[in-house]
Amino acid sequence: MSGQINAFEMAQKQFDGVAKQLKLDPGVAEVLRWPMREFSFRIPVRLDDGSLRVFQGFRVQHNDARGPNKGGIRFAANETMDTVRALATWMTWKCAVADIPLGGGKGGIIVDPSTLTVNEKEEMCRGWVRAMWKNIGPRNDVPAPDIGTTPQMMGWMMDEYSRLVGQYTPGVFTGKPLGGGGSLGRTEATGYGVIYTVREAMKHLNIDSKNSVAAIQGFGNVSQYAAAGFVEMLGGTVACVSCYDRHEKKAFTYSKKGGIDPRFLLTIVDEYGTIDKAKAQDAGYTVEDGDAWITKEANVLIPAAMEGQVTADTVNKMSKNIKIVAEGANGPCTPEADEYFKKNNIFDIPDFLCNAGGVTTSYFEQVQNDMNFYWSKDEVLGRLDEKMTSAFNGVVERSEKEKVYMRDAAYMVAIDRVVKAMELRGWLTGNA
Ligand code: NAD
């Protein structure tokens, strides 16, 4: 989280608002406002030049009433304990709304991974596990990749854990590489999950998907498969995608008359989500400023790049025909944008529902690891569709019943499920 915004204060504020609407017992609310466990530790790493450096590591376990904690590990220079607390809290709500039997966790190391050699990265990963191994595991906390960490890193971490416990334990980390315990369908999962929720929203609002047009921000993991899914599953048109060009250090919007071709763009995008501008122009794409994506004529808006993109300023630039906003990214819409959506009757699919396809498929990966039996891609995606559809319908139902905005309804569903699990386990009676 950049600037002066404290992500954890924001997470607590969002929770407090819904806890009040739910008339949650103040003691119960106090349990959920804070993570249950927090780990802060130092990781000594021998660098390739022979020097020894010590890095700061974190793991936060917010709430595991519904099952083992789940959440990524970030390697980032601006990582803070409060960021990790916030992300762990949001993971509790995301797992609960998707109704997967997991809690919320998050971890990290304060480091810019681009400054490390491959050896140093591996040492860092193994060091994180040596610090945490007694407090993670398939039955208590299952980390995954996040910003600055990769499937290969999860492979090293799983290996270190397996050595320490003395047995092959692939289910301790998810997001592992295919062939190294990873699951088919994980790459597509978040983007396709976004599209499953958009499809359900269209049914709910009686919108014809074949005549629909989406404007998408980003062309990374989430947005690539959201774009492909919008065209291939819904029969719609994608007016544009955008990306941050890491060579020119500037964002651009890519559009084409009649709609972009996501599969073509997939052949000219690099692993960081930067589209090859010259090749796109050769293929007849119009390249405009990064901000242009939000102004395109469309009825579906999919911000799937980063946080804080649909704001008090940019929301006014949106096409007046937008009927659905599908939050592929985490936190892409500010509270001011929410107010605009409410006033203009725009249907918002909140982030922790819309992009829950990633964690849901991570859960499937863990299940496959536990069984040592691997599913086909169709089976993974079929189960994902079922989970996302049912999560979406649960939130819509709550939103209609309580006459509340979709984001609040999603919080209500999630908080209720976590409170119920705590009650059933006897955590709230004082005897546990
Ligand atoms: P990514 O790094 O693969 O892709 C990000 C894309 O956004 C890239 O194309 C990048 O160029 C583009 N981008 C960055 N800054 C931009 C800007 N200013 N304007 C336009 N485009 C810009 O990331 P991702 O995995 O696709 O994640 C995107 C968002 O979705 C993040 O908020 C992430 O936390 C969230 N998310 C991801 C997953 C997942 O499984 N990958 C799951 C849940 C949530």
Image: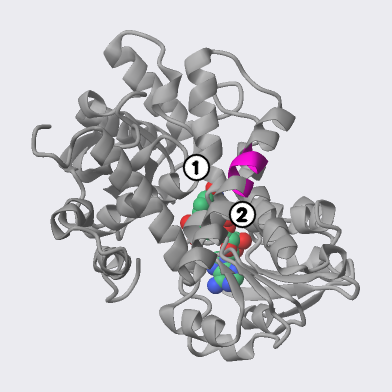
Which quadrant holds residue 223? Answer: bottom right
Boundaries of the magenta span: 384-389
As drawn, which residue projects farthest toward the top? 166
Q: Does the numbered disc 1 mark a residue whose Cβ is under 8 Å from ligand 1?
A: yes
Q: Does the numbered disc 2 mark a residue whose Cβ is under 8 Å from ligand 1?
A: yes
Percent of width and height locating residue 119: 39, 32
User: Is residue 107 visible in this depiction of the protein?
Assistant: no
- Residue at x 27% of width, y 43% of height: 63
User: Is residue 384 visible in this depiction of the protein?
Assistant: yes
Percent of width and height locating residue 110: 27, 51
Q: Nearer the viewer, mark 2 or mark 1?
A: 1
The quadrant the N terminus occupies is bottom left
**Which residue is disc 2 drawn over?**
222
In the picture, measured across the screen, residue 420 lies left or right of residue 195, that is left
The quadrant the C terminus occupies is top left
In the picture, measured across the screen, residue 347 lies left or right of residue 225, that is left
385 in the magenta segment: yes
Q: How many other residues sit within 10 Å of disc 2, few (<14), some (14-19) or many (≥20)?
A: many
195 over 135 or under it: above or below = below
Compare marks 2 and 1 and give the one earlier in the sequence: 2
**Which residue is disc 1 drawn over?**
359
- Residue at x 30% of width, y 65% of height: 7
Residue type (three-letter) at the residue carrying disc 1: Val
**Could you say which is closer to the camera, residue 253 or residue 357?**
357
Classified by dominant secondary structure, the portion drawn in magenta counts as helix
Which quadrant holds residue 345? Answer: bottom right
Residue type (three-letter) at the residue carrying disc 2: Val
Q: How many other residues sit within 10 Å of disc 1, few (<14), some (14-19) or many (≥20)?
A: many
Percent of width and height locating residue 154: 44, 32
331 over 423 or under it: above or below = below
Mark 2 lies on a secondary structure that is helix
- Residue at x 62% of width, y 19% of height: 374
